[in-house]
Image (tube, grey):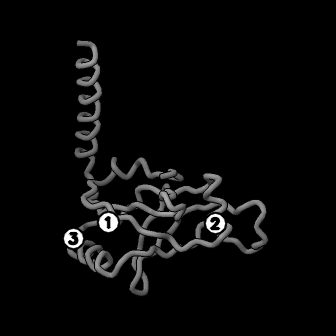
């Protein structure tokens, strides 16, 4: 698995409950551009349109050798998931204050571009502080155990 881009702020801003892997509909030049690691999912989000999920605001730079003159680097890209997963995700988002958060963009073992996204509930400011405290405590605990 070759990592292309990750959203490091996602675990800081959201409680992630479920993680789901989906394929992405890309053009050939976009795939070549991603192979050179020129993609970013920072600030991207997933929306439901016309009975399917779409990745919005994901930036994939134009491939240098492509002929496409009217290339839009932040166009919406369709996500490929099963109907069962789609119904599960749609039910969760309509049920409560759950968001669909992109976590990472990568190539799997077969060389296909995949997006890992999660169903997350937004954290409050005090939850974020608690997360930082727990992270610091775990680091200190590891150092203490290592020194003993």
Residue at x-position 21% and y-position 70%: 96
User: Furthest-front residue in view?
Assistant: 110
Report x, y in % for residue 107: 51, 58
Report x, y in % for residue 97: 25, 67
Q: Residue 18 occupies which quadrant of the picture?
A: bottom left
Residue at x-position 44% and y-position 55%: 104
Front tag of 2 and 3 = 2
Q: Which residue is mark 1?
A: 99
Compared across the picture, whether 9 is left or right of 147 comes to: right
Q: Mark 3 and mark 1: span between their CA atoms? A: 9 Å
Residue 33 is tagged as: none
Q: Which residue is mark 2?
A: 30
User: Would you place residue 107 above or below residue 134 in this image?
Assistant: below
Residue at x-position 40% and y-position 60%: 116
Q: Mark 2 and mark 3: span between their CA atoms? A: 35 Å
Report x, y in % for residue 55: 47, 70
């Amino acid at each position: 698995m070759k990592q292309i881009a990750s959203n490091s702020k996602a675990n800081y801003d959201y409680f992630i409950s479920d993680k789901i892997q989906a394929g992405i509909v890309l053009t050939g030049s976009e795939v070549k551009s991603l192979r050179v690691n020129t993609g970013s999912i920072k600030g991207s989000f997933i929306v439901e349109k016309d009975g399917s999920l779409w990745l919005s605001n994901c930036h994939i730079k134009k491939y240098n050798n492509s002929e496409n003159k009217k290339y839009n680097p932040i166009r919406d890209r369709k996500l490929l998931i099963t109907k069962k997963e789609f119904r599960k995700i749609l039910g969760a988002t309509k049920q409560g204050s759950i968001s669909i958060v992109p976590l990472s963009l990568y190539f799997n073992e077969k060389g296909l571009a995949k997006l890992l996204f999660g169903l997350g509930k937004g954290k409050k400011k005090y939850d974020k502080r608690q997360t930082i405290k727990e992270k610091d405590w775990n680091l200190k605990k590891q150092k203490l155990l290592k020194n003993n």
